[in-house]
Image (cartoon, helix red, strand yellow):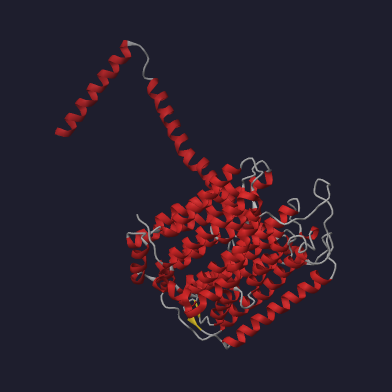
Amino acid sequence: FGLLMDPLSMTFVMLVTFVGSLIHVYSIAYMEHDKDRRRFFAYLNFFIAAMLILVLGNSYAILFVGWEGVGLASYLLIGFWNYVPEYATAAKKAFVMNRVGDMGLLAAMMVMFAQFSSVDFRTVSAEVTGASQGAATLIGLFLLLAATGKSAQFPLQAWLGDAMAGPTPVSALIHAATMVTAGVYLIVRSGAVYVQAPIAATVVAIVGAITLLFGAIIGTAKDDIKKVLAASTMSQIGYMMLGAGLGPIGWAFAIFHLFTHGFFKALMFLGAGSVMHAMDNQVNMRNFGALKGAMKITWITFMMGWLAILGVPPFSGFWSKDPIIEAAFAASNFGNIEASWPGWVFGTVALVGAGITAFYMSRLFFMTFHGKARWTKTMAGEPIQPHESSPLMTVPMIILAVGAVFLGGLLTINSTFVTWLEPVTGETVHAEPVLPVIAIQVLVLLVVIIGALYAWKKYGREEVSQAVPAAGALVHAARNDLYQDQLNEGLFMVPGQALMRGVTAADHSFVDGIVRGLAKLAAGTGRAISKAQTGYVRSYAAYVSGGVLLALVVILATRI
């Protein structure tokens, strides 16, 4: 048991502590009037401490301690306002769904210990090269199950939208620096396992590709500003998982995008909190509009985050997300099969995701800050007067905006960030994509422009209805999170309940049957023996005489 301070863990330490500190400062003003703010800050610090344990441990055992701590802290913070039944339910949902993933991490550790007699990172990385591909694949799939729960990836992504029940600074911390980033850390930290298990690595990439599309589609139909951002996190983590699943060509880029994403996603969540602060805690974007005049700092800083997540050059997202898309087009393995078509499939999915991201994030930006004002009264019926937030809230946003603009470009100079990670990820393999790099960059920029312009046409120029318009089947499905709750019920709850009913029936009929049978046998035997206890001396004398006679017969029989 010990700590491991290498470039990968230190990258997370810098992200968690820097972004976490800014969120703490922001929270001072945001939670100023909450009577339970002391409890809030205690939970918030516990959250960060657990995440630091997770990324600094030198073994899967210590990582698991932090992993469970993060899960507990998220439960406490998501359900912080637990007097609201829906919020308490959301906290329980996140906690239970994460436990499903946690079983995967426990199972992976058991297999590791059985195979290598250790769960130390360095020992596992060294020993796995000599393990069978079957054992490595099993470990890799169990680790992926753990990552899908913690990072809200398919099929365990349903908790993330409901987790917006917590205070906005909590959402910023979960989505930018802690919790959902833990799964990406786990996969990249276990890179040696996935080199030995190409099938498991391909499954990681497939899960990432599915999730980035799932999140993007869901984001197009949501009117809750925080839930749109939650969907975008699901999608962006999907990009990171896709990069991590591609192996040495994508590990460093996955962490690079995670690092820059932490800045612009925290910025946008804090910006959303600033808007809610000014709008009587309303979250429905159909009741916003034209806020740029009253909230110039929030508008400008949010714009920086918006352009960064779109991947517009020279903002940070361009430098970190585009390399993942290029790596996706360079994918040449599908399990043990080498071919060019995986590059076309993964690359096209990543490209389409970039276009949808541009649409729904532009939709959020235009519905909130542009167009006509659609706000008149607070939820209490009083006139709304939007105003800029206090410096304690705007200064952290300004600092994060600087990172959203410049961080990606600065870390790309001389491949600074990728080189920094090489002691952990190894030298990044530069595979040739199925399309020229310049063509990929042009295509990405083109779909981003198309998505943003379409959003401007529908939500920037045209009047936005305050009533939710009728929609087709796909939009209706997106509004219902693509029925992911029903999917989870079908995949986990219904089979789990059926299994438990079977186990209960077996317990009652077989286990309890054995116990009851033994009891009946003992009772029957006792009743039979008790009949010999008549209380008469002559009976006992007869029994003794019979016993002596039987003994004599046996002795004589053995001598003959």
Q: Quadrant of residue 547?
A: top left
* Visible residue check, residue 138: no
* Visible residue check, residue 445: yes
Residue found at x 69% / y 62%: 298
Direction from residue 233 to residue 333 in the image, left or right: left
Residue 340: image x %, image y %?
Answer: 54, 85
Say which of 455 and 319 sits in front: 319
* Residue extending farthest left: 559
Q: Quadrant of residue 559?
A: top left
Above or below 507: residue 303:
below
Residue 501: image x %, image y %?
Answer: 57, 47
Q: Quadrant of residue 55?
A: bottom left
Residue 163: image x %, image y %?
Answer: 63, 53
Direction from residue 138 to residue 401 in the image, left or right: right
- How many marks the image carries: the answer is 0
* Residue extending farthest top: 537
Residue found at x 56% / y 69%: 260
Say which of 33 and 189 sits in front: 33
Say which of 294 and 420 sits in front: 294
Residue found at x 43% / y 28%: 524
Residue 472: image x %, image y %?
Answer: 80, 67
Which quarter of the rendered picture does the C terminus lie within?
A: top left
Above or below 384: residue 300:
below
Which quarter of the rendered picture does the N terminus lie within?
A: bottom left
